[in-house]
């Protein structure tokens, strides 16, 4: 089984959906998860309804499955329909809940609580308004992780909503469950803020 604590830095790259590029029709999102050297470790895909994707847009209910190269389930992340504040539930490959990500109300920043499997807040994620592509994760005032949207080039940025995110975790301080939660949070950030 893959141990994400061996990978303090990963890249989550959304796959380009050609139908979406030419028609604007929202299709199910797909992602590859790679090391900085380009080795593909995991593959993620969205499960959602046609009407939800095209009418409810970034507020739609969905499930994201993350699998390894042998198609073994590593993470399942799901959320219900929401009006304002999203809540993502994350389980490991065995179906055991490892945590959740709850968006909090804030006027001048994008804020999330990262919770463990029992619902206790273990860290806070903040995306400053003047750094729209960066989300820092803090525990007791110290930065322990970061999710950063990467520049994909003028063509990809202008014509697709396929994004790449760099996920960094202080694996010397945080365990496997937190690494799984951070990986799922990168996909949640894409769905909440960069879908269109």
Image (cartoon, rainbow, N blue to C red):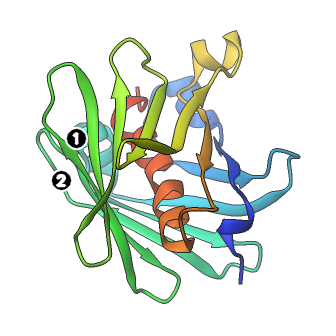
Say if 188 sits above or below 131 in the image: below
| Residue 131 visible from this viewpoint | yes
Q: Nearer the viewer, residue 125 or 142?
A: 142
Residue for point 44% across, 43% down: 142
Q: Nearer the viewer, residue 115 or 77?
A: 115
Q: Nearer the viewer, residue 57 or 112?
A: 112
Residue 113 lies left or right of residue 98; in this view the side is: left
The residue under label 1 is 56
Quadrant housing residue 72: bottom right
Residue 98, image x, y percentages: 40, 75
Crowding around mark 1 (Cα neighbors within 10 Å: few <14, some 14 to 19, many 20+) is: some
Residue for point 21% across, 19% down: 108
Residue for point 15% across, 48% down: 82
Quadrant housing residue 137: top left
Q: In the structure shown, which secondary structural element does the residue marked by tag 2 occupy? A: loop
Q: Tell me if label 2 and label 1 are in contact, CB under 8 Å.
A: yes
Residue 194, image x, y percentages: 43, 29
Label 2 and label 1: CA atoms lie apart by: 8 Å
Residue 104, image x, y percentages: 17, 42
Q: Quadrant of the C terminus?
A: top left
| Residue 89 visible from this viewpoint | no
Dot placed on the residue nearer the N-terminal end, 2 or 1? 1
The residue under label 2 is 81
Q: In the structure shown, which secondary structural element does the residue marked by tag 1 occupy? A: helix
Say if 98 sits above or below 142 in the image: below
Residue 147 lies left or right of residue 154; in this view the side is: left
């Amino acid at each position: 089984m893959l141990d994400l604590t061996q990978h303090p830095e990963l890249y989550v790259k959304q796959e380009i959906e050609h139908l979406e590029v030419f028609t604007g029709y929202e299709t199910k999102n797909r992602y590859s998860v790679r090391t900085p050297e380009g080795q593909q470790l995991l593959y993620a895909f969205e499960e959602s309804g046609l009407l939800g994707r095209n009418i409810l847009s970034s507020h739609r209910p969905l499930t994201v499955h993350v699998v390894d190269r042998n198609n073994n389930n590593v993470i399942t992340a799901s959320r219900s329909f929401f009006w304002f504040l999203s809540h993502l539930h994350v389980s490991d490959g065995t179906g055991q809940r490892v945590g959740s990500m709850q968006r909090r109300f804030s006027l001048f920043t994008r804020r999330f609580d990262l919770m463990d499997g029992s619902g206790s807040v273990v860290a806070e994620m903040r995306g400053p308004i003047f750094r729209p592509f960066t989300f820092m994760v803090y525990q007791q005032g110290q930065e322990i992780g970061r999710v950063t949207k990467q520049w994909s080039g003028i063509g990809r940025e202008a014509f697709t909503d396929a994004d790449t995110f760099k996920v960094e975790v202080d694996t010397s301080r945080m365990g496997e469950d937190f690494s799984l939660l951070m990986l799922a949070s990168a996909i949640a950030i894409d769905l909440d803020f960069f879908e269109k």
